[in-house]
Amino acid sequence: MSETSGGMSFHSRRSVKPQDLSPNGTLFGGNLLQWIDEECAIFAISQLGSWRVVTKFMSEIDFVSTAHLGELIELGLEATAFGRTSLTLRVEVRNMVTGEPIVTIERIVMICLGADGRPAPHGQTVATHGNERIPKETSAASSRSAYLL
Ligand SMILES: CC(C)(COP(=O)(O)OP(=O)(O)OC[C@H]1O[C@@H](n2cnc3c(N)ncnc32)[C@H](O)[C@@H]1OP(=O)(O)O)[C@@H](O)C(=O)NCCC(=O)NCCS
């Protein structure tokens, strides 16, 4: 497995809308996890050059603070290790208004699959900061990944 370092390499921002709130009136954890998973999938596609990626593993999730209606949150992602078929990510989510961390997930493992749905080698060993690995052929956008498009 090839380890990488060098800090957060991708940032994404969201505003907290009424439909994102829990009955408590604060950001619903399930919504945040959906955003994190979606960002991880897009990040893995752009790193591994394949539409066929799935989330395999997420380490401990500890929501240490929250966000309120109208506040902005920032998701930061970095690739921490490239395996044979896997890509390990680290994710930090921060409230941009209060400056407080909301959650840090130390280890999220994404797996590259072949057409048979089994793990397949992705051939990558280092992270890219560009978009050159995003698959260009739209025919690769199988029904299984069409939800992203
Ligand atoms: C992803 C999936 C195909 C992996 O199958 P598997 O038989 O466990 O895979 P393998 O044992 O061949 O391992 C493949 C890779 O996953 C990694 N892996 C397997 N289990 C893991 C775990 N519990 N935690 C972290 N990594 C794991 C292995 O280390 C390996 O990585 P490497 O090739 O870089 O060394 C299978 O578990 C699956 O389909 N899961 C559902 C995924 C999904 O649909 N996610 C969305 C939410 S439902």
Image (cartoon, rainbow, N blue to C red):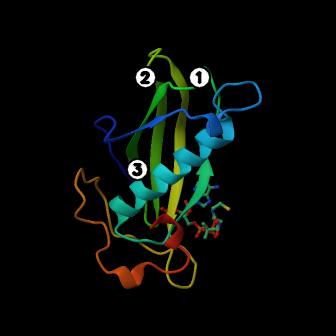
* Mark carried by residue 137: none
The C terminus lies in quadrant: bottom left
Distance between the alpha carbons at the discs numbered 1 and 3? 34 Å
22 horizontally vs 131: left or right: right
The N terminus lies in quadrant: bottom left
Q: Residue furthest right?
A: 23
Of the image marks 1 and 2, the number of the one nearer the N terminus: 1
At x 47%, y 51%, the residue is 40
Distance between the alpha carbons at the discs numbered 3 and 2? 27 Å
Of the image marks 1 and 3, the number of the one nearer the N terminus: 1
In the image, 54 versus 123, the foreground residue is: 54
Distance between the alpha carbons at the discs numbered 1 and 2? 11 Å
Where is mark 3, residue-wise?
81
Q: Which residue type does callout 1 highlight?
A: His
Quarter of the rendered structure image containing ligand 1: bottom right
At x 31%, y 59%, the residue is 125
Under tag 1, what secondary structure? loop
Q: Residue furthest front?
A: 18
Q: Which residue type does callout 3 highlight?
A: Ala
20 horizontally vs 47: left or right: right
- How packed is label 1: few (under 14 Cα within 10 Å), some, or many (20 or more)? some
- How packed is label 3: few (under 14 Cα within 10 Å), some, or many (20 or more)? many
The spot of residue 62 in percent (x, y) is 65, 28
Where is mark 2, residue-wise?
96
Where is mark 1, residue-wise?
68
94 horizontally vs 133: left or right: right
In the image, 79 versus 68, the foreground residue is: 68
